[in-house]
Image (cartoon, rainbow, N blue to C red):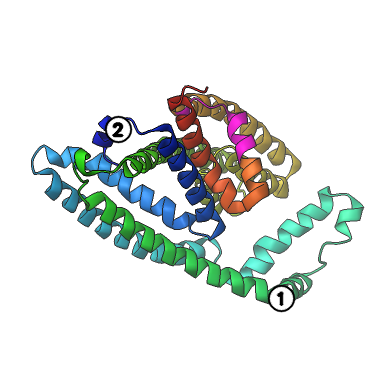
């Protein structure tokens, strides 16, 4: 993945096509065997090391700079994990509070307000009391106990894969590339594929991070600033802001998820607040359309509808992991096609 590899002699068409097939097979297998989290975390560490090393390389040697960056990133990751656990506990205690009060003071009032605004055919299916709501939730948990257990095991597995990916990314970032004359033609071609995949990851992830931060900022101003000043308090507003940032990391579809949650929360207060929230979301959506065109589009020269089609196809083939991988895979595919002067 060293840039000097691109300067090696041009491989034969057979070797180049073989590298394309191997790269495509590897990317599909990564999703199929549920290793996408390891790949993304490894790419993240590698790109962070590559981006931060030149800053330290002005004062210390390149190898030591990489080692310092990896050590700092390791400390940051461990620290963030600790802060994330403690912050999540503190956040849910302050935001949700006593579970009993959550049932009575937040969830049931939402149901009652929904009764006043929804059609009768939907109202008949809503619980009549806190006890009915609690019983329904418990019964739902019992019916899906196996699914919940599998989800818990899956979350632990994903966490382990992320840690392994972080370690592998750090190891690759610290390893020295062999001299160009010692690299075989297939290795050089595969290294170029990896280099372009890392570039696609960098372009998509860091651009989408900027968009998510901007979207979260405007959402926080609206939910935690503008509405409270008008005496309107949307339930679970802080949670909605956090959800907006997390799902905002998914191009296009992330906005739809957060917008739907905010609109529902606004309607739970009143029809007027719901309309105001919808108008705000339309305004933000228009702003983000230009942001996507400028930030993401200029990075990979792709429009929003292109990413959406790629995400729909990948979701149909691989489910949620396909949705997450689609923008990166599409950006990589487009970079390879452009390098071959096919588009």
Q: Secondary structure at mark 1?
A: helix
**Which of the marked residues, 1 or 2, is nearer the chain's N terminus?**
2
| In the displayed structure image, the side of residue 318 where residue 217 appears, left or right | left
Q: Residue at x 51, y 49 (%)?
A: 25
Percent position (x, y) of residue 115? 82, 55
| Disc 2 target residue | 6
Q: Quadrant of the N terminus?
A: top left
Residue 304 point in image, percent of width and height: 58, 30
Q: Would you name the residue on which mark 1 appears?
A: 138
Does residue 2 appear left or right of residue 235 in this picture? Answer: left
| Residue 65 position (above or below residue 97) | above
Q: Are marks 1 and 2 in contact (CB under 8 Å)?
A: no
Q: Residue at x 53, y 27 (%)?
A: 302
Q: Is residue 311 left or right of residue 1?
A: right
Residue 303 within the magenta-colored segment of the rendering: yes
Residue 146 in sight from this viewpoint: yes
Relative vertical location of residue 314 with respect to residue 275 in this rendering, above or below = below
- Classify mark 2: helix, strand or loop: helix
Seen from the viewer's position, the closer of residues 303 and 140 is 303
- Is residue 308 located in the magenta-colored stretch of the structure? yes
Locate residue 15: give its quadrant: top left
Q: Is residue 200 above or below residue 43?
A: above
What residue span does the magenta drawing correspond to?
A: 300-310
Of marks 1 and 2, the one in the foreground: 2
Instruction: Name the residue rendered at 60%, 26% in the picture.
Output: 286
């Amino acid at each position: 993945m060293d840039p000097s590899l691109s300067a090696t002699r041009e491989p034969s068409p057979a070797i180049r096509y073989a590298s394309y097939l191997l790269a495509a097979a590897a990317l599909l297998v990564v999703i199929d065997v549920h290793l996408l989290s390891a790949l993304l975390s490894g790419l993240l560490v590698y790109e962070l090391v590559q981006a931060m090393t030149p800053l330290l390389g002005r004062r210390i040697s390149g190898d030591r700079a990489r080692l310092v960056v990896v050590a700092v990133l390791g400390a940051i990751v461990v620290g963030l994990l600790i802060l994330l656990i403690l912050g999540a506990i503190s956040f849910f205690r302050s935001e949700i509070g006593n579970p009993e009060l959550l049932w009575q003071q937040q969830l049931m009032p939402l149901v009652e307000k929904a009764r006043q605004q929804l059609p009768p055919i939907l109202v008949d299916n809503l619980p009549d009391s806190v006890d009915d709501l609690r019983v329904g939730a418990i019964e739902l948990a019992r019916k899906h106990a196996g699914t919940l257990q599998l989800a818990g095991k899956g979350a632990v597995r994903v966490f382990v894969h992320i840690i392994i990916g972080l370690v592998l990314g750090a190891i690759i970032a610290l390893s020295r590339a062999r001299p160009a004359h010692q690299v075989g033609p297939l290795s050089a071609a595969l290294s170029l594929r990896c280099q372009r995949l890392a570039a696609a990851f960098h372009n998509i992830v860091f651009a989408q991070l900027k968009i998510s931060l901007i979207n979260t900022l405007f959402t926080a101003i609206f939910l935690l600033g503008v509405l409270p000043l008008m005496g309107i308090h949307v339930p679970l507003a802080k949670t909605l802001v956090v959800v907006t940032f997390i799902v905002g990391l998914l191009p296009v579809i992330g906005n739809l998820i957060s917008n739907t949650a905010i609109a529902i929360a606004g309607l739970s207060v009143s029809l007027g607040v719901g309309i105001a929230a919808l108008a705000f979301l339309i305004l933000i959506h228009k702003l983000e359309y230009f942001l996507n065109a400028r930030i993401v589009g200029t990075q990979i020269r792709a429009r929003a509808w292109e990413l959406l089609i790629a995400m729909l196809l990948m979701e149909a083939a691989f489910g949620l992991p396909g949705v997450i991988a689609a923008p990166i895979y599409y950006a990589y595919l487009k970079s390879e096609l452009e390098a071959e002067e096919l588009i």
